[in-house]
Amino acid sequence: MRYGIIGTGNMGSMLTTSFITSKAVSARDLVIYNRSAEKALKLKKIYKNLTVASSLEEVTNNSDVIFLCVKPHHFKDVLDPLNHNLNDSHCLVSITSPVSVNELENHTPCQVARIVPSITNRALSGVSLFTFGERITEGNKQNLRTLFKTISHPVEIEEEYIRASSDIVSCGPAFVSFLLKNWIESAHKVSGIPQEKATELTEEMMIGLGTLLSKKIFSLDELMEKVTVKGGVTGEGLKALESHVGPLFEEMFTATQRKHLEDKKTIKF
Ligand SMILES: NC(=O)C1=CN([C@@H]2O[C@H](COP(=O)(O)OP(=O)(O)OC[C@H]3O[C@@H](n4cnc5c(N)ncnc54)[C@H](OP(=O)(O)O)[C@@H]3O)[C@@H](O)[C@H]2O)C=CC1
Ligand SMILES: O=C(O)[C@@H]1CCC=N1
């Protein structure tokens, strides 16, 4: 199977790197293309056997599965020329949430899937969100599941839940990093602990927490129960959190839903 990647920004580069480092795909079977060549050439410097295409046509001629890793507002720029060379044997995989597989199927002649990745897939970890179109073959479904199993935990997701799911798995690393930075600053402000020390402790705590969860040693409820010693300090901290968290996360999930709908209205094909 040969793979094409159109758009080698954050996510296109991440997928290229993760596919190669996980050995899921040989660099020889990858052809990449970016609007401005530098980002693609940077990858070629690291992975010498990659092909950097000089046109979209070169991508379609040399790939069975093509990942579309541009922002949704650039879809039209890519799909218009791409459609001349796509046929029903190609499989086009979009990685962006506001474009549904139905919309993609309506604007392309090929098989279609949407797989929303997460920056955590760079560590061959975290979730990838799968939605298949009507035309995709069972063989390609299986091939994509196998491919993404090497870099992530693939989960099939219904269209109605894509926004909240992508908020959790794809935006989540940015949201949680924001909260943790706030936590580090507060620890410094209240206790005087140097920021670097608090950062080291926080990052190591997160790695430990992730490892506990990955080994399924404790659930979230069990973690809260086991750490909250009766009459101890954790309980006091939790009470402070409970009295301030309010609608914080509801507002966050509502804000992304709002932006998602706005984006859907303005994306042109
Ligand atoms: N960032 C994330 O964590 C996640 C992002 N996504 C989705 O992935 C998509 C890409 O995001 P991200 O990688 O962060 O964005 P970037 O801006 O980093 O990358 C987009 C890339 O697309 C290239 N591009 C634009 N137009 C064309 C074109 N006509 N032909 C070829 N290449 C083109 C840009 O090239 P140039 O260098 O010329 O600007 C750029 O390198 C978005 O739709 C986003 O929603 C999904 C999950 C997670
Ligand atoms: O399309 C999305 O939902 C992703 C999540 C992070 C950025 N874009």
Image: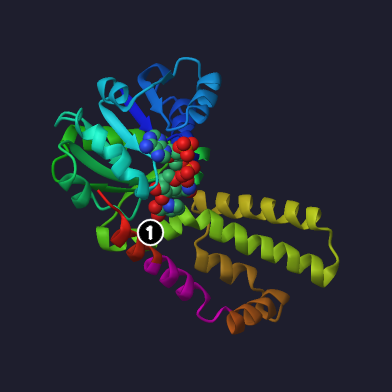
Give the image location of residue 63, x and y in percent: 28, 24
At horizontal 64% and vertical 73% (from top left) the residue drawn is 228
Q: Nearer the viewer, residue 68 or 18?
A: 68
What residue lies at 84% left-to-right and 62% top-to-bottom? 193
Q: Residue at 43% of width from left, 31% of height from top?
A: 34
Is residue 217 shown in magenta? no
Report which residue position mark 1 lands on: 165
The image quarter containing residue 94 is top left
Residue range in magenta is 245-258
Residue drawn at x 81%, y 72% as measured from the top left: 190
Residue 54 located left or right of residue 232? left
Helix or strand or loop: what does disc 1 sit on? helix
Q: Is residue 239 above or below residue 106?
A: below
Quarter of the image with the N terminus is top left
Q: Residue furthest bottom?
A: 243
Q: Amino acid at mark 1?
A: Ser
Q: Is residue 42 left or right of residue 63?
A: right
Pick whichever, 124 or 161, lies toward us. 161
Q: Position of residue 234 (x, y in %)?
A: 68, 74
Q: Local crowd at mark 1 within 10 Å, few (<14), some, or many (≥20)?
A: many
Q: Judge whether residue 133 can be spotted in this image.
A: no
**For the residue with label 1, is its CB less than 8 Å from the closest atom of ligand 2?**
no
Residue 197 visible (yes or no): yes
What coloring was used for the rendering?
rainbow
**Which quadrant of the structure image shows residue 236?**
bottom right
Q: Is residue 91 left or right of residue 263?
A: left
Residue 12: % across, % down:
44, 36
Q: Overall secondary structure of the magenta stretch?
A: helix
